[in-house]
């Protein structure tokens, strides 16, 4: 069983393909950690992984994904503070998948204004999405796509 900074890897306890069982696991973890932004963020990451994996298989998974991403983004300032308090030697945050996943869903739904707004927020927080150009390049691509859609509609 693996550990990082005292956390037990959640995947040691369940099967990502079992949507219901895994969902209940994270629901219990969220309830037990609702006052701990550090742990709650990692629980949200579990939900994000689960809902993203099942978004095309389970009717409400994508809507739940959007909700959890928004909750994690709202939690982010408190998580950031808790992260550096628990990891004072770290200079950087871990990746925060809620931003990237929410942008992807909004883009897939052609909700480009919302996707751009989340990119702007990620840039404001100084986050990196792990891609070559980061959120800046992602936002530029979304704005180009948006302007092409507007031109097409004229």
Image (cartoon, grey):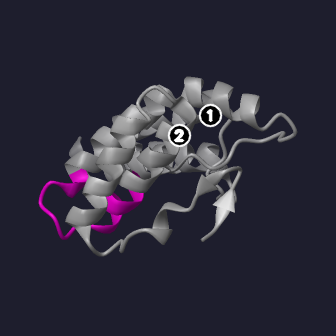
Q: Is residue 152 above or below residue 91?
A: below
SS under mark 1: helix
Percent position of residue 96, x then y: 57, 46
| Residue at image coords 57%, 35% | 38
Q: Are marks 1 and 2 in contact (CB under 8 Å)?
A: no
Range shown magenta: 48-62
Give the image quarter of residue 31. Answer: top left
| Residue at image coords 18%, 70% | 57
Q: Which mark is residue 78?
A: none
Q: Marks 1 and 2: which is nearer the front?
A: 2
Residue 26 in the figure: left or right of residue 83: left
Residue 63 in the figure: left or right of residue 59: right
Q: Earlier in the sequence, mark 1 or mark 2?
A: 2
Percent position of residue 95, x then y: 62, 50
Distance CA(mark 1)–CA(mark 2): 24 Å
Q: Which mark is residue 123?
A: 1
**Closest to the observer: 11 or 120?**
11
| Residue at image coords 22%, 44% | 153
Residue lying furthest right? 89
**Closest to the observer: 76 or 100?**
76
Q: Quadrant of the N terminus?
A: bottom right
Q: For the residue carrying disc 2, how many other residues have a C-alpha within 10 Å: few (<14), some (14-19), or many (20+)?
A: some
Percent position of residue 109, x then y: 25, 51
Q: Quadrant of the C terminus?
A: top left
SS under mark 2: helix
**Closest to the observer: 73 or 42?**
42
Note whether residue 17 is visible. Answer: yes
Q: For the residue carrying disc 1, how many other residues have a C-alpha within 10 Å: few (<14), some (14-19), or many (20+)?
A: some
Percent position of residue 149, x then y: 31, 48
Q: Which residue is mark 2?
A: 39
Note whether residue 104 is visible. Answer: no
- How many numbered discs sit on the rendered protein? 2
């Amino acid at each position: 069983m693996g550990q990082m900074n005292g956390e037990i890897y959640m995947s040691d306890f369940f099967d990502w393909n079992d949507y219901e069982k895994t969902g209940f696991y994270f629901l219990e973890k969220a309830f037990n950690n609702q006052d701990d932004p550090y742990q709650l963020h990692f629980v949200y990451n579990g939900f994000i992984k689960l809902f993203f994996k099942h978004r095309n298989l389970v009717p409400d998974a994508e809507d739940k994904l959007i909700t959890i991403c928004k909750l994690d983004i709202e939690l982010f300032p408190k998580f950031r503070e808790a992260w550096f308090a628990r990891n004072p030697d770290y200079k950087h945050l871990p990746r925060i998948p809620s931003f990237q996943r929410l942008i992807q869903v909004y883009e897939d739904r052609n909700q480009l204004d919302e996707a751009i707004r989340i990119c702007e927020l990620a840039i404001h927080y100084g986050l990196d999405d792990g891609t070559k150009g980061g959120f800046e390049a992602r936002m530029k691509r979304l704005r180009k796509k948006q302007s092409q859609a507007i031109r097409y509609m004229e």
